């Protein structure tokens, strides 16, 4: 029950962040409203857990291994972004590049220090889940060098915070890397280099929405940490198209009745299968001598 309610709550969080991004597309990002939003939903999630109960240990493990880190990672990400904004020095490109590079080095040090947990988590292993993602455990794996328990142990396990921080640091590193790229090429505009060839999406916008949600739900971008709004904005920028609010466009897909709900993805699969079949059927005639 908790896991289901938490999933719905996370979708609401993503929609709220999406709306903030829509409202602030033409200005530099201000982390404060995003951080307030993340804090609000994190508090709601905590109340949900403290007032309810898990069906069994497996649900508890899944919650603290996969669900809570998603909420907490956004909170950590926007807090880190706020800190970077405050600390960013004023000066030439060389000074800014050194600042961004130093911040990336801190992230690399954190990842190295927690490499064992990182490897365990992304390998899909489960044998130590009970020691890492259950509350009030007496022992944790010896390689978990510094377990992070929050103030309320009813809402904390040895590894859920560290997993959330690993997820957040990946997003921060991507942000810092993009800032360095902007510094290295003075001709790069907000939407890309003026010297590069432009690409335009000439099909229906709803087809691109299908593709965006396909990538989002399969977790193919940034280890699954890229939000649907981020993916849609990437498509809009790359293909010079206005898609609109993703959740509203997704509602159009869900309301399809006569057609397949994934019409475009089905067409892509059919086209690929057809080409493969045609290639398999083609048998070149050997030259006669």
Image: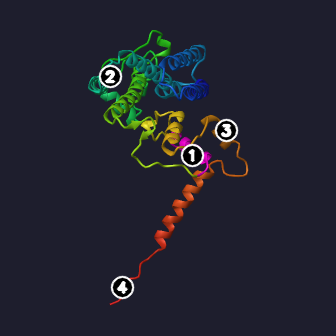
C-alpha distance separating marks 4 and 2? 66 Å
- Name the residue at 44% across, 12% down: 150
Side of 21 where 225 appears, left or right: left
Name the spot of residue 214 as percent of width and height, x first.
54, 44
Residue matched to label 1: 208
- Name the residue at 42% across, 25% down: 168
Instruction: Using the rendered view, name the quadrant where residue 241 is placed.
Output: top right
Residue matched to label 3: 251
Question: CB under 8 Å between callouts 3 and 4?
Answer: no
Q: Secondary structure at mark 1?
A: helix
The boundaries of the magenta stretch are 203-217
Residue matched to label 2: 144
- Name the residue at 46% across, 69% down: 279
Name the spot of residue 40 as percent of width and height, x first.
56, 16
C-alpha distance separating marks 2 and 1? 42 Å
C-alpha distance separating marks 1 and 4? 46 Å
Q: Residue furthest right?
A: 258
Q: Secondary structure at mark 4?
A: loop
Q: Name the mark nearer the viewer: 1 or 4.
A: 1
Q: Name the mark nearer the viewer: 1 or 3.
A: 1
C-alpha distance separating marks 1 and 3? 14 Å
C-alpha distance separating marks 2 and 3? 43 Å
Residue count near mark 3 (Cα–Cα under 10 Å), binned few <14, some 14–19, many ≥20:
few
Residue 287: mark in rendering = 4
């Amino acid at each position: 029950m908790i896991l289901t309610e938490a999933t719905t709550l996370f979708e609401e969080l993503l929609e709220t962040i999406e709306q903030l991004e829509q409202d602030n597309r033409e200005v530099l990002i201000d982390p404060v409203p995003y951080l307030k939003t993340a804090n609000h939903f994190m508090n709601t999630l905590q109340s949900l857990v403290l007032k309810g109960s898990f069906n069994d240990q497996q649900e508890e493990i899944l919650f603290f291994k996969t669900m809570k880190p998603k909420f907490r990672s956004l909170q950590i990400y926007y807090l880190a972004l706020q800190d970077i904004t405050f600390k960013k020095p004023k000066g030439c490109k060389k000074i800014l590049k050194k600042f961004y590079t130093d911040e990336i080095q801190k992230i690399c040090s954190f990842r190295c220090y927690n490499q064992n947990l990182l490897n365990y988590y992304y390998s899909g292993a489960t044998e130590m889940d009970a020691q890492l993602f259950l509350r009030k455990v007496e022992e944790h794996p010896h390689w978990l060098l510094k377990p992070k328990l929050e103030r309320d142990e009813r809402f904390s396990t040895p590894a859920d915070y560290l997993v959330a921080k690993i997820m957040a640091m990946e997003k921060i590193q991507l942000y810092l890397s993009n800032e360095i790229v902007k510094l290295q090429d003075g001709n790069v505009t907000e939407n890309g280099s003026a010297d590069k060839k432009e690409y335009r999406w000439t099909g229906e916008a709803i087809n691109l929405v299908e593709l965006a949600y396909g990538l989002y739900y399969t977790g193919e971008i940034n280890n699954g940490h890229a939000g649907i709004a981020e993916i849609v904005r990437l498509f809009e920028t790359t293909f010079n198209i206005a898609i609109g609010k993703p959740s509203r466009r997704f509602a159009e897909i869900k309301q399809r009745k006569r057609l397949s709900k994934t019409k475009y993805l089905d067409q892509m699969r059919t086209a690929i299968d057809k080409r493969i079949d045609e290639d398999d059927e083609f048998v070149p005639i050997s030259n006669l001598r």
